[in-house]
Each structure stands twice: as structure tokens, then as C-alpha cells.
Image (cartoon, rainbow, N blue to C red):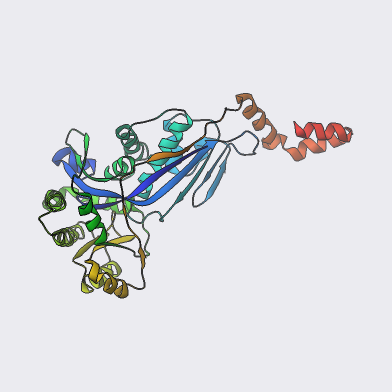
Amino acid sequence: MIITSTPLRISFFGGGTDYPIWYREHGGAVLATTIDKRCYITCRRLPPFFEYHSRVSYSKVENVTRNDAIEHPSVRACLQFLRIEEGVEIHHVADLPARTGLGTSSAFTVGLLLALYALKEQMRDKQTLAAEAIHIEQVLLQEAVGAQDQVSAAYGGFNRINFLTDGSIEVKRVLTAQNRLAELEQHLALYFTGFARTASEIAQEQLKVTSQRQKELDTMLLLVDEAESIVTDTSRSLDEFGRLLHESWKIKRTLTKKITNASIDEIYEAGIGAGALGGKLLGAGGGGFMLFYVRPERREALRTRLKKLLCVPLGFSNRGSHVVVYEPEEAYDKSLAMERGAIYAPETSISVAKQTIEAESVPNGLLATAFQR
């Protein structure tokens, strides 16, 4: 039995510059942190005593007769990438819902890869784990996703992530006093807008117009430098960070028409009206979680103004994806899986076998022995 724990993330600045179509020409960077909300993957080899070959449980349950029949794209791709054809059982649970701007899809892929490697009695360093997750999502699945979510999920922590034109990625931990990050944490409020969306659909729209948004993306890239300076320079007021979030949101919402809508704008304006200095919709846009920067003395006013929305407690986390349970077990003989296939094949189902045996008047004792086998 293997269980992995992988953090979700909040991206503050630089989102949009982590797409290969942009950073391979211009370079990119994001300022992001992982939070104390996580996704958990449970994985084991499936014993050969079930009528299905593999079982995958997430928002739905799949029982399949072969691994390439799995519908969940990330699960199917990860198993193919690692050439795992044996039967497995995989379960996924998370602290927060998917498609809400917190990098849940990439956290799932990173956590599953780590679990499957552990199942194979292998380990991967953080850099390799992130790179392979990016390869699976961008190349194998052809999804319109950036590269920051996989990196944050693998590494954990409050980081500046640089995307270089040669395709390489640098992860630099933001070095500042611990109480400085704790103070920033106390100024952040996370609200669920209730609108789920598929990030890749919005990202595809953004990618189409990337070449036309060079000025906006260049500015968003510069904001990463400024935001990092605010966090690391303890002589500066953190309120500057909040106001910078506001400037970044004003730019981001102009990238495509799908990033925001009337309901999202109304929520944001209500937050600003209640005293928040800035904020942003997390992820690609269209819905999900909205982050506000608000002074502690104005937090209750913000909560009252947004009382119809769920406020989620928020804390930073330094731990990246890791194995929390590792209990290896001896693998079953492969011949047992072959026997299972024969037993549960449609043309040799138990009901047919039982009818045949009864027709031949096999004594009850032998009948019981036959089905025990």
C-alpha cells in the first residue's frame, strides 16, 4: 500500500508566462506558494481475485479489464508512461474540489507518478518528478497547461520559479524572515466563488492570443520582480503586495474574455468595497477560488460582505509531494492473473461454469472445491 500527499498551490504573479509558447521565446517567471490543502493518492497492486483488472476511484469509479481502457486521462497516461500493465487499485481524495484554480490536476499527476514509482520500488527527485509530470500533461495528453503547477506540487514552499528560453526551469526558494511570510499569510483570504471550470479550455483561448499580448505579459513578468522585492525587504509595507495584486488582476482580466464574467467582477468589486487592497481569481480564470489581500482589521467586514461565499482557512506549506505510507507487499504470481482472466472472461463466467458442472451431476463436495479454486 502506497499513499502520497501532494500540496495545492496559490500563484500570485506571473501566471501566463509559464506556457512554453511564451517562455521559450521571452522567458517567464512566477511567484507562488503551496498551501496546507492537499490531494492524496492511494495505490496498490490489485490482488488477482476480482472480476476487473484495475480499479480507479475519483469523482467516479472505473473497473476496467485492461489499463488502456481507463477513462481518466492522467491515470491512463501515467500507467502507460511507466509501462505498468499489471492490475492496480488507485484512489484519489482531496481537501478542495478540482477545477478551481489551485493546481489540482497537476497535483494529481505529480502525486500519482510518485505513488507508481514507489509501487515499482523506485524514487524520483523533485526536478525529475516535475519534468515528467509536465511531459505527461503537455506532450502525452496535449493539454493546454503551463509548467508552474507541476513544479509547485513537486517542490512545495514559497518560490520564485524561472522558465528559461532553453526550456529549463529554475526553482528558487524566496528567502525572507519566517514571520514575514506569517504576516503575509494573515493578510490573505480565500473565497470559493462556486463556479467550477475547465482550465485547459480557458488556457487554449489565451494561448491563441499570446502573440498579441506581449506588452501585458511583459508587464506581468516585471511584477514578479517587484512582488519578490516586497516580500524579501522587511522595510517595505506588505500593503504594497496587495496593491500589486490589484494591478496584476487588472492586466490578467484583459488577456481573454473568458477569464472573468459579470458574477466574478461583482464579487471582486464587493471585496474591494469591503476593504481589500487587491486580489485575483486563481488559475486560468472563469471561476473557482478568489484570493483577497485584506488587512486583519478589515477581515470581518470582508467576511460580512461576502457572507454568501465559503471562506476557506488558508496556511502556507513547505512540503512538496511525498510518500506518507509505504508498505510494500510481495507481488502475486503472474499466472494467477492469467487464471483470473480465464475465470472472469464472458464466455467462461461462473454462472456458465456452474450450469455445466451441475449438468454433469458433479457431487456437491467437488462443486464447492471447484469454485474455491
Q: Number of labelled discs?
A: 0
> Looking at the picture, how far across and down is residue 189, in whole percent?
29, 63
Does 369 appear above or below 300? Answer: above
Residue at figure coordinates x 19%, y 60% from the top left:
249
Q: Nearer the viewer, residue 228 or 289?
A: 228
Compared across the picture, whether 149 is left or right of 219 comes to: right
Residue at figure coordinates x 25%, y 73% from the top left:
270
> Looking at the picture, how far across and down is residue 28, in whole percent?
17, 43
Compared across the picture, whether 348 is left or right of 163 comes to: right
Does 338 appear above or below 303? Answer: above
- Camera sees residue 124: yes
Picture quarter containing residue 322?
Answer: top left
Q: Nearer the viewer, residue 300 or 361?
A: 300
Picture quarter containing residue 160?
Answer: top left
Residue at figure coordinates x 21%, y 68% from the top left:
276
Picture quarter containing residue 175?
Answer: top left
Compared across the picture, whether 342 is left or right of 321 comes to: right
Q: Nearer the viewer, residue 324 or 275?
A: 324
Q: Nearer the viewer, residue 104 or 352?
A: 104
> Looking at the picture, how far across and down is residue 283, in whole percent?
29, 54
- Camera sees residue 16: no
Quadrant assignment for the C terminus? top right
